[in-house]
Image (cartoon, grey):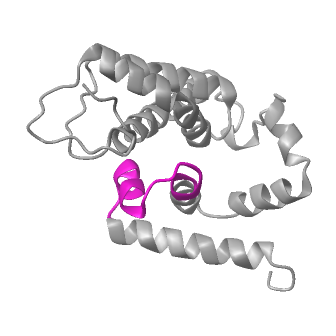
Amino acid sequence: MSPISSDTTFQPGVRQMEQCELERALERLHPETWGWALACCGREKEMAEEVLQNSYLRIISGRAKFGGTSSLKTWLFGVIRLTAREEIRRRKFSLKRFLSSRSLDNLRDESTDADEAVERVDGSRALIEAMASLSRRQQQVLQLVFYHGMTIEDAAGVMHISLGSARTHYERGKKALARLLTPGLAP
């Protein structure tokens, strides 16, 4: 049996991957899935760890099943994205319930981590600031395409949006980044 490639598209006739083969694929894709989980969780490390673990648990337990209609990587990123959305909703509900006297918008994350060290580099800081100014969908599609090597079509699948919408967000995001990162072009 040949190892799974993250770019392999499985045949619809294949019912289910063997458990050990799936676990090996998850292990191989872990660095990329960690980066995607961080992006989906707003760079909050603890939440990303929980989301990734819950995603893996859903997959290993069979609650999330790979249907073979896309690449394993595309499907996996979609599971992580949906798990992150559920976790964010759950946390917002909990915060509203227990901190009803405080506005959620005024809460700040005061944790520090290694990502801040990367942000100190001028080029990285400029890119991070420029990415932060983009819409959430533009950020996600650009990250999936540039950092995770997906096609725009795969990114659309992960994000559960149409291909045309993904292309629009991709093009607008690239143009906005070019404007923000090129001296003299910024508004």
Task: Give yes or no for residue 158 being in the magenta stretch.
Answer: yes
Where are the magenta residues, as a range? 143-162
- The image position of residue 27, as x and y in percent, is 47, 22
- Which residue is at 66% across, 75% downward? 176
Residue 46 position (above or below residue 182): above
- The image position of residue 152, as x and y in percent, is 42, 63
Q: Which quadrant: the N terminus?
A: top left
Nearer the observer, 49 or 60:
60
Which residue is outermost to the front? 1
- Which residue is at 72% across, 33% downward? 102
Residue 5 position (above or below residue 113): below
Q: Is residue 37 left or right of residue 69?
A: right
> Hey, which quadrant is residue 117 in on the image?
top right
Which residue is outermost to the left? 13
> Hey, which quadrant is residue 156 in on the image?
bottom left
Q: Which quadrant: the C terminus?
A: bottom right
Q: Is residue 3 visible?
A: yes
Q: Is residue 58 left or right of residue 181?
A: left
Q: Could you tell me what secondary structure mostly forms the magenta stretch? A: helix
- The image position of residue 86, as x and y in percent, is 44, 32
